[in-house]
Image (cartoon, helix red, strand yellow):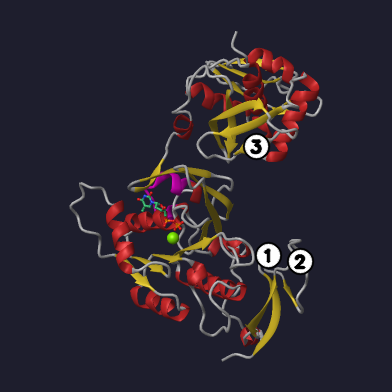
């Protein structure tokens, strides 16, 4: 066994220090340092010390591979899009998300699908083989008579050496590790899920992927800091980082790429968790608006960008007299600071009597809006509830609200309008355009406003 020494590691961001620090200078979290034993760096560098090394520099032009055609196609279209168009051989992909959000389900579906094209090894450290079999049966179409393919291999294992041995003997094209927090390297004297184990095990999978051309998917739970280290500190080691998000009580799930060496970041795939696994939602705007009550006061339609894709979502506002002196502002799916800012602007610039009113805002479908472009819809939903007047049902609202009550331009206007037009909306209330030469889609009337007040005038149904 290698020589070891002790060090202290931040459980939140992975920063190492010689002694325990009260507050991490890197991520600012308190009391996150724990002691760990680490193996001293093996004599890896010695190999190259005489000047000879395994890999010699080559002209880029002579290097084989790198063609887009090498990607393994994946018929789960939303997943393929987020990956940049299929699975890249030799890539290491991290899929993070809260427990219970659907990571195992999505990857088992992927495994079943990819097994048609080659061998897939699914390594689980969390569930028993019979549990996984049960899930696989559930994910199969009910009319499917064909048995599960023999090329889909399953093993429950958490020992890194044993996993690598199984990979060696089965030679899969795709390896799925569910989850990286359960895997441990027996050479290292710290428990599974610790920073050192996570780093070392992920690094071994990275080497495996790069040396063999095997694609590796690592599942990682996002957990509260301090319990076990989250996948955040692995982000720099892997090629692609995807997060599966959503409200556990709602069925929509967003698969978001936050890093991708082989495709666009900020790409988003939308799924719905149904009785038979994760189902793609090819037209999310339609799904998000499916239950909308037209002509109800307090309902506004925002057009938000998720990655490169515009999404129409309903923002609901409700105001009611507050029982106690201290009015509440409560938002679901919106940033609380944004909500406070909007209510302040509505109170001060438009004179809305919100001082004695509780304000509730909800984004339908469990989506989280992080974009100021939804400000106008947020403000309109609240104002519409206060006035008890519905907004025009065929109109979408786009624009950022400034502190002086002005309406500010947002990026990607043509794409947003196109999506709104495609869903049958007739007009859009939006800021005055700075770039008049931008090509706007036909079939949707643009109604420009300079201020929030003007915009609300245009938006309220007459
Ligand atoms: P799972 O994939 O186990 O989540 P994770 O691996 O991210 O922890 O998903 C668990 C949830 O999904 C569980 O609450 C049950 C639900 N589910 C369905 O609704 N439909 C299905 O077909 C499956 C397999 C799971
Ligand atoms: Mg799981």
The residue pinned by badge 1 equals 13
Q: Earlier in the sequence, mark 2 or mark 3?
A: 2
* Residue beneath the point at 27% across and 56% down: 137
- Which residue is disc 2 drawn over? 24
Tag count in the figure?
Answer: 3
The quarter of the displayed image where residue 122 is located? bottom left
Which of discs 3 and 1 lies nearer the camera? The answer is 3
Q: Position of residue 38 (x, y in %)?
A: 64, 82
Of helix, strand and loop, which one carries label 1? Answer: loop
Circle 3 sits in a helix, a strand or a loop, which is it?
Answer: strand
Q: Can you say which quadrant of the picture contains the N terminus?
A: bottom right
Residue 220 in view in this figure: yes
**In this picture, which residue range is highlighted in magenta?**
69-81
Horizontal side of residue 152 vs 373, given as left or right? left
Examine the rendered structure and indicate whether residue 395 appears above or below residue 306.
Answer: above
Answer with mark 3 or mark 1, whichever residue precedes in sequence. 1
Ligand 1: does it lie within 8 Å of the C-beta at label 1? Answer: no
Badges 1 and 2: C-beta atoms under 8 Å apart? yes
Quarter the C terminus occupies? top right
Report the residue at 80% width, 29% height from top: 403
31 sits to left or right of 106? right
Observer-nearest of 64 and 111:
111
Residue 71 inside the magenta-drawn segment: yes
Residue located 39% across and 51% down the image? 74
Tags 3 and 1 in contact by the CB under 8 Å rule?
no
**Label 2: element kind:** loop
Report the residue that reaches farthest toward the top. Answer: 462
Crowdedness of circle 1 by 10 Å Cα count: few (<14), some, many (20+)?
many
Residue 128 relative to residue 318: left or right: left
């Amino acid at each position: 066994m290698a020589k070891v020494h002790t060090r202290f590691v931040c459980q939140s961001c992975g920063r190492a220090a010689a002694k325990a620090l009260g507050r991490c200078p890197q991520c600012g979290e308190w009391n996150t340092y724990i002691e760990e034993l680490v193996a001293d760096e093996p004599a890896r560098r010695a190999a190259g010390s005489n000047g000879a090394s395994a890999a010699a520099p080559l002209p880029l032009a002579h290097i084989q591979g790198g063609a887009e055609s090498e990607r393994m196609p994946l018929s789960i279209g939303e997943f393929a899009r987020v990956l940049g168009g299929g699975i890249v051989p030799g890539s290491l992909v991290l899929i993070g998300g809260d427990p219970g959000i659907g990571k195992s389900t999505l990857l088992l579906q992927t495994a079943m699908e990819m097994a048609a094209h080659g061998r897939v090894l699914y390594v689980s450290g969390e569930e028993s083989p019979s549990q996984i079999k049960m899930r696989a049966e559930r994910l199969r179409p009910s009319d499917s008579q064909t048995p599960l393919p023999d090329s889909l291999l399953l093993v429950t294992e958490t020992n890194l050496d044993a996993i690598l041995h199984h990979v060696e003997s089965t030679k899969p094209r795709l390896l799925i590790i569910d989850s990286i927090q359960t895997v441990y390297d027996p050479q290292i004297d710290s428990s599974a899920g610790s920073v050192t184990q996570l780093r070392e095990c992920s690094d071994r999978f990275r080497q495996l992927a790069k040396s063999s051309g095997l694609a590796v998917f690592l599942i990682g739970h996002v957990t509260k800091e301090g319990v076990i280290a989250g996948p955040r500190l692995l982000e720099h080691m892997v090629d692609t980082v995807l997060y599966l998000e959503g409200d556990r009580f709602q069925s929509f799930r967003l698969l978001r790429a936050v890093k991708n060496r082989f495709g666009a970041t900020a790409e988003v795939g939308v799924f719905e968790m149904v009785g038979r696994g994760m189902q793609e939602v090819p037209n999310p705007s339609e799904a998000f608006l499916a239950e909308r009550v037209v002509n109800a006061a307090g309902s506004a339609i925002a057009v938000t960008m998720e990655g490169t894709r515009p999404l129409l979502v309903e923002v609901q506002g409700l105001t009611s007299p507050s029982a106690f002196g201290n009015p509440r502002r409560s938002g679901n799916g919106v940033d609380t600071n944004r909500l406070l800012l909007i209510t302040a602007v509505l109170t001060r610039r438009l004179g809305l009597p919100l001082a004695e009113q509780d304000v509730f805002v909800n984004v339908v479908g469990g989506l989280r809006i992080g974009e100021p472009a939804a400000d106008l819809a947020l403000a309109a939903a609240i104002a519409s509830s206060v006035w008890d007047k519905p907004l025009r049902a065929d109109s979408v609202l786009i624009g950022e609200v400034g502190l002086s009550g002005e309406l500010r331009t947002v990026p990607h206007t043509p794409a947003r309008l196109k999506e709104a037009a495609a869903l049958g909306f007739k007009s859009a209330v939006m800021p005055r355009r700075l770039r008049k030469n931008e090509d706007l889609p036909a079939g949707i009337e643009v109604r420009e406003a300079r201020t929030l007040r003007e915009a609300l005038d245009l938006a309220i149904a007459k």
